[in-house]
Amino acid sequence: MAKMIPMKERGKRTPRHMPEQDVHKRIHNFNEVSLGYTKEDAIYEAQRCLQCRSPTCMDGCPADINIPEFIKKIVEENFTGSYFEILKTNNLPAIAGRVCPQEEQCSKACVWNKANKAIHIGRLERFVADWARDNKIHLERVGIEKKNKKIAIVGSGPAGLTCSADLVKIGYDVTLFEALQKPGGVLVYGIPEFRLPKAIVEYEIGEIKRLGVTIETDFIVGLTKSVDELAEEFDAIFLANGAGAPRFLHLPGENLNDVYSANEFLTRSNLMKAYAFPKYDTPIKVGKKVAVIGGGNVAMDSARTALRLGTEEVHLVYRRTSKEAPARKEELTHAEEEGIIFDFLTLPLKILGNEQGDINGMECIKMRLGEPDESGRRRPIYIDGTNFILQVDLVIVAIGTAANPIVARSATGVKTNKWGYFITDENTCSTTRKGIFAGGDIVRGAATVISAVGDGKRAAKAINNFLQ
Amino acid sequence: MSKIIRVEKWHDVIYSMWIKALQISMKVQPGQFVILMIDEKGERIPLTVADYHREEGWVQVVFQTVGTSTMKLAQMSIGDEFFSFIGPLGKPSEIKKYGTVITIGGGTGIACIHPITRALKEVGNKVIAIIGARTKELIIMEEEMKEASTELHITTDDGSYMRKGFVTEVLKEVLQGEKNVRKVWAIGPAIMMKATCAVAKPFGIDVIVSLNAIMVDGTGMCGSCRVTVGGQTKYTCVDGPEFNGHLVEWREFMNRLTRYTELEKLSSKMYKKKCQRK
Ligand SMILES: Cc1cc2nc3c(=O)[nH]c(=O)nc-3n(C[C@H](O)[C@H](O)[C@H](O)COP(=O)(O)OP(=O)(O)OC[C@H]3O[C@@H](n4cnc5c(N)ncnc54)[C@H](O)[C@@H]3O)c2cc1C
Ligand SMILES: Cc1cc2nc3c(=O)[nH]c(=O)nc-3n(C[C@H](O)[C@H](O)[C@H](O)COP(=O)(O)OP(=O)(O)OC[C@H]3O[C@@H](n4cnc5c(N)ncnc54)[C@H](O)[C@@H]3O)c2cc1C
Ligand code: SF4
Ligand code: FES
């Protein structure tokens, strides 16, 4: 059995690389890019952990995972124990291990980061979760006392799933309502298969169902039933409907035929499996030359999806530089490796088309960076006379999302701010109406999976307190 | 789960289906629609609710087979369950007492205009209904429409039944005769709705049209269904499907309906081949 290694040894080791699918192959398929650690890799990496007395890594984890503890159990080859340790606070480890920006969170806060050798905590989390899945390890619920209280959760993204799991674990009767035909939120309709395989999402949701959560898909809160009606049937409600509405730039030509929102493009491909058209019935257009507007994860996902669908040339058009781009560094690197052309410091002005509505180019202008703005990022400024036409025939607008008002409209007394996001108490997630809580993207605006998980946990605690 | 409780084939390409959908039947209002998926690999298909029964818990849809998904739908029979069935979607029609109104249905649009016609009459309007189709066999729900309206006119393009010509010709005559028409509803092919607007415009009468934009989710999440109305981008699924036809950017709307024509052709060719092999 593996064991702890001397401190000196830990210092000598370099972080363990995670194998990836060959770049030339992967641009032609939708299989996962990152291949995950082997048992040996995981133990090797876990042995580097210093088992800090006051682990700074945990300050960086919105899900409060006991990081040194689960890592220690990997070293001890007690993978089941390690899995259960993570499950204490995070019900979606295989997902979080794949999509969390650890470099901005736990790994950034890891003491090793100063030496540029932060522990790859996410890869370890992913290994443990994958191992548990392969070995059919399940969390069993035993001797939980039923609390005779019913809770409704609206939306089955990471916030809703987490809140449901935490509440059902302590004995509540939980029903999760989801508008789409499949639960998972952005995890199923947004993030592509090659980054987060849908079978894994399905599995982790299955584990939450096993705990006893009832999931009602095809149920649009606000249309099928209002929040007010749910409030009559349930003792508490958690609103976690995400920030699902697409945003556009309001450019001339934006309603031409082949201008997609990233939401439409990704939903067709991921949720409806249009990448397998015509085996699946939902079609998706494959442009010859595609421009993706934006610089975040959503833009990277759209660009890489377009490439895999068979687009010859994919341009990423972003008005700042890679340094300001909000996408994870890993995604930028992957996109670059795969041959996405980065047109940084470029602003689209107009999408050009013919009478039939087909796109025949996009007019852009070059930018330079000026002084920092309110967000601290340097403000892009036009360079006069640098207009040019990018020859593209399909455009994907990936500049973020906004609140969809359907849920809020049906919830009397639940106040929203001027962007339509619910106003909540930071610690308890409670809204302005008693018994109704909210969290995830519909409070924060487009944020992260793990911050949604964090909100789900806080809300579960607060709901439990409220119902005592 | 939503189960089919009755199917009728009205014509080679027109089918009517009654589906048990308790929650939707309780909530649905005239003008609203549902989205269904036949199986896990299917598309999300939007269809207008042609009728509903709150006590018995069903909704009726009437559809025309135009491509793969609707051909597959036509293969389903009593007892079959849908993989997914959601609704009611879209804003209800604005039903109130206007005085005299006209409702127009073309093709399967007749089924869509039916509940609106009935509701308008129920609240005390004089409702002049005009329905039309290419040929006699495609005139559907004649009895229901007669009952739902105050006065019913029927046209066929080829003159095989009732009056020969387009619904718009009748509309013009009615507008010339009736002085107090407050509003017109028109549902059918885009070209017919556009033509209706053109006829009503000189009379200064608003035409409410129901747009069948290409949709995915139907809940305001993807923007596939966007259309320009009065210079603003609207989502047909949540802001519509009914809009003031005089403000609709028809060219753009009709262009966007052709977004997937090539792929749809490929898909239905393959589907037909598959059916032949069976
Ligand atoms: C393409 C893309 C890539 C991303 N990549 C990353 C990444 O790599 N790492 C990361 O940390 N974050 C990433 N994010 C952000 C992250 O996915 C979100 O912050 C997170 O999913 C928010 O979780 P949520 O539970 O609040 O909402 P969502 O995941 O949005 O889920 C909300 C759910 O509510 C449902 N719903 C909405 N309205 C209703 C209604 N009326 N009735 C019933 N149900 C309703 C929706 O259908 C949806 O299933 C990405 C986002 C996108 C779009
Ligand atoms: C709000 C709304 C209500 C509708 N009500 C009815 C109805 O009551 N009866 C009826 O027969 N039809 C109705 N339609 C149209 C119906 O949804 C389409 O005919 C059907 O989706 C076509 O699918 P297909 O695969 O058979 O045909 P395809 O071969 O895919 O396409 C044929 C035509 O249908 C249109 N279409 C394709 N996909 C969609 C989609 N996802 N959403 C909308 N249109 C699409 C395209 O413009 C195309 O020209 C409605 C559409 C909308 C948006
Ligand atoms: S800070 Fe880094 S080294 Fe310390 S316990 Fe956390 S992961 Fe291990
Ligand atoms: S169908 Fe997706 S926004 Fe209307």
Image (cartoon, rainbow, N blue to C red):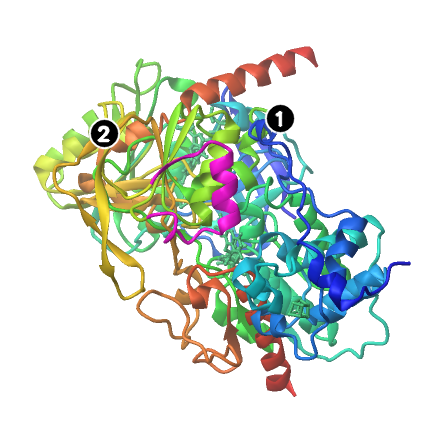
State the CA–CA distance, disc 1 to disc 2: 49 Å
Which residue position holds label 2?
Answer: A389
What percent of the width, then of the height, locates residue A78? 86, 62
Tag 1 near tag 2, CB within 8 Å = no
What percent of the width, then of the height, locates residue A377? 31, 60
Specify the segment rendered in magenta.
A321-343
Identity of the residue drawn at 47% across and 22% down: B264
Q: Point out the residue furthest to the right here.
A: A1
Quadrant housing the C terminus of chain A: bottom right
Which class describes the residues within 10 Å of circle 2: few (<14), some (14-19), or many (20+)? some
**For residue B196, side relative to residue B16 (left or right):** left
Say what amino acid the circle numbered 1 marks: Gln
**For residue A89, side relative to residue A246 (left or right):** right
Say what amino acid the circle numbered 2 marks: Ile
Tell me the tag on residue B75.
1
**Chain under disc 1:** B
